[in-house]
Structures are given as C-alpha cells and as structure tokens.
Amino acid sequence: MSTTSNDIPSLTLRVLENIQGELVGLRGDVQVLSDRFQGLNDRFDHFLGFVGRDVQDLKVRVAALEQHNLPRQP
C-alpha cells in the first residue's frame, strides 16, 4: 500500500490520537505512583490538557486540509 501526500495529515492525526490514548492509559499508573509522590498527578493532568488541546486543534486542521485537497486516488 502506498501513501500519498493527501494521506499524511490523516495518518499523522491517527498516530497522535494513539499516542494520546497511551498517555491517558498511563494516567492510571500515575494515579498509583501519586500515592507515593504527592502532586505528580496534578502535573500529569496539566500535561494531558495540553495534549488534548493539541490533538483537538490538529483534528480541526486536518478536516480543513481534507476539504481543500483533491479527491484521494485509490
């Protein structure tokens, strides 16, 4: 399967969404650790907020790019 330049924004978004999912999954592990290290969760939540906003911003940008791109070639 070949990748065209039209596929790059969508592929990038999927990778970033997967990374975000992994980070959210780590949230449970951080909860356990935070019992030992006070305040760790607050910093991690702050970081996840940035990641969430960045992924949402990328979704909007990818949608805009896809509306302006030529139809994808099979």
Image (cartoon, grey):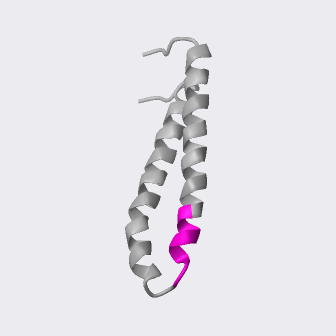
Give whichever of 34, 21 is nearer the camera.
34
Whole-percent x and y of residue 52? 54, 49
For the N terminus, the quadrant is: top left
Does 40 appear in magenta?
yes
Left or right of 53, for residue 28 = left
Where in the figure is residue 25, as x and y percent of width and height? 39, 61
Query: Left or right of 61: which side holds 72?
Result: left
Name the quarter where the C terminus is drawn. top left
Tell me which residue sits at (43%, 84%) in the image: 35
Q: Left or right: where does residue 15 sit relative to residue 49?
A: left
**Residue most toward the bottom?**
36
Does the stretch in magenta take in 49?
Answer: no
Q: Nearer the viewer, residue 54 or 9?
A: 54
Whole-percent x, y for residue 20 in the image: 48, 52
In the image, what residue occupies the spot 58% across and 26% down?
Answer: 5
Question: In percent of the image, x 58 and y 30: which residue is there?
Answer: 60
Residue closest to the eye, 35 or 17: 35
The part of the chain drawn in magenta is 38-45
Q: Quadrant of residue 44?
A: bottom right
* 9 versus 39 height, above or below: above
Q: Is residue 4 above or below residue 74?
A: below
Q: Position of residue 24 (x, y in %)?
A: 43, 58
Can residue 8 be seen here? The reply is: no
Examine the image and state in which quarter residue 8 appears: top right
* Residue 49 makes an appearance in the image: yes
Secondary structure predominantly adopted by residues drawn in magenta: helix
